[in-house]
Image (spheres, helix red, strand yellow):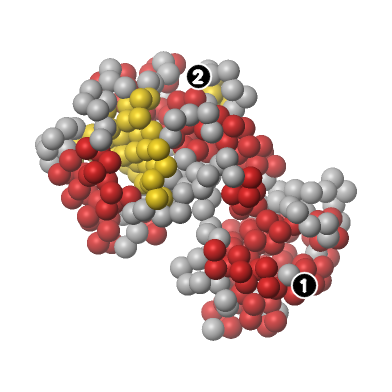
Amino acid sequence: MGMKLSEQFQRFAKYECENSSKLYEVLSYQIAEDAELLDIVTTIPTGQPKPNLLFAIVHYLLFEKDESLKNYYPTFSDHLLPAEEAFLPFKQFVLKHEQSLNELFQTKLVQTNEVRRCAYLYPMFAEIYEEHKQPLALVEIGTSAGLQLGVDQYNYLYNGEISVTNSKTPVIISSENIGTPLPNAIYTTPKVKTRIGVDLNPIDLKDENELRWLQALIWPEHHERRELLKEAANVVTQLHLQLVRGDGIAKLEDLCELIPEGEMIVVFHTHVANQIPMEGRQQLVEKLSKISTKRPLYHCYNNMYDPNLHQDYIYDGEIIEKRMMENTDGHARWFNWAK
């Protein structure tokens, strides 16, 4: 077990933290060499990315504890101590709070809610609305806290110059489009009537602890993402969302049955399908095809069969690929719009 686990931390340091989080990069390399800490981490349930969960839980506990470890975290300190010296205080903190960590390992899940992904969903949804002139019914599988269901309420800035104002909220999502020019449809706010999010473990943004958990999942250096999360949470808590606990694929047909005629259904999910077994993905496609024999719908997604972003129109059982976008950043700092 030890070998494989230490490799996980080395890979995490190199492929995920490098140029993104100096603190986590330094700590990961050192945890990989520390038998005592690796032993604690073995209690994390299978299926959860262990480095992510360990760091998020320590971060989460630090929000409410007055400990010297905070001095190494950009989240809490403007007078940072060097990341290279953080390992010993980190280890002491983990050993001191081992019991809390073990309890949280069993109950917390890595559920990132990257609001910025709305940057590429928004032009798709705006275009669908313009084409069909019907209010949209958004159904998100793996919705987490439902932040992406507020897609029409946010403002956008593309390539530092294309500005889209949909609301008076302070939320401005900026991203670079490295593909073909965006459609004019983006300047008309799409009407959204129904917002349904399904998740095995939906997060209630009105619950302070749950919001803190989402904040803790964001890496210490990423201030801008934390700010955006806070602002978007304020918007989404004002909207009428239906958050449904359970398996999105199993519940899909029943949920679509409840959507009034005259609304265009858009089923979407980002960075979720890779966690669904292949037979589950096939079931999803079969269910969407079946629903489409009663009414047409859209399916917008990535990570089903490849990392690309897809937009399919499904009508009478037939899947028509509307667009496919390659080379999109996982945090949506850039995307590649395709006509």
Q: Is residue 280 left or right of residue 73?
A: left
Neighbour tally class for label 2: few under 14, some 14-19, many 20 plus, Cα within 10 Å: some
When the figure is inspected, residue 219 is found, relative to residue 45, above or below; the finding is above
Q: Which mark is residue 291?
A: none
Q: Which residue is mark 2?
A: 166
SS under mark 2: loop
Mark 2: amino acid: Asn
Q: CA distance from mark 1 to mark 2?
A: 48 Å
Residue 298 in sight here: yes
Residue 220 % position (x, y) = 70, 51
Labels 1 and 2 touching (C-beta < 8 A): no
Residue at 31 percent of width and 34 percent of height: 266
Residue at 63 percent of width and 50 percent of height: 209
Mark 1: amino acid: Lys
Residue at 66 percent of width and 37 percent of height: 227
Neighbour tally class for label 1: few under 14, some 14-19, many 20 plus, Cα within 10 Å: few
Residue 159 % position (x, y) = 55, 27
Q: Quadrant where the C terminus lies?
A: top left
Q: Quadrant where the N terminus lies?
A: bottom right
Query: In this orientation, which residue lies closer to the viewer: 176 or 218?
Result: 218
Q: Is residue 274 left or right of residue 95?
A: left
Q: Which residue is mark 1?
A: 96
- Residue found farthest to the front: 207
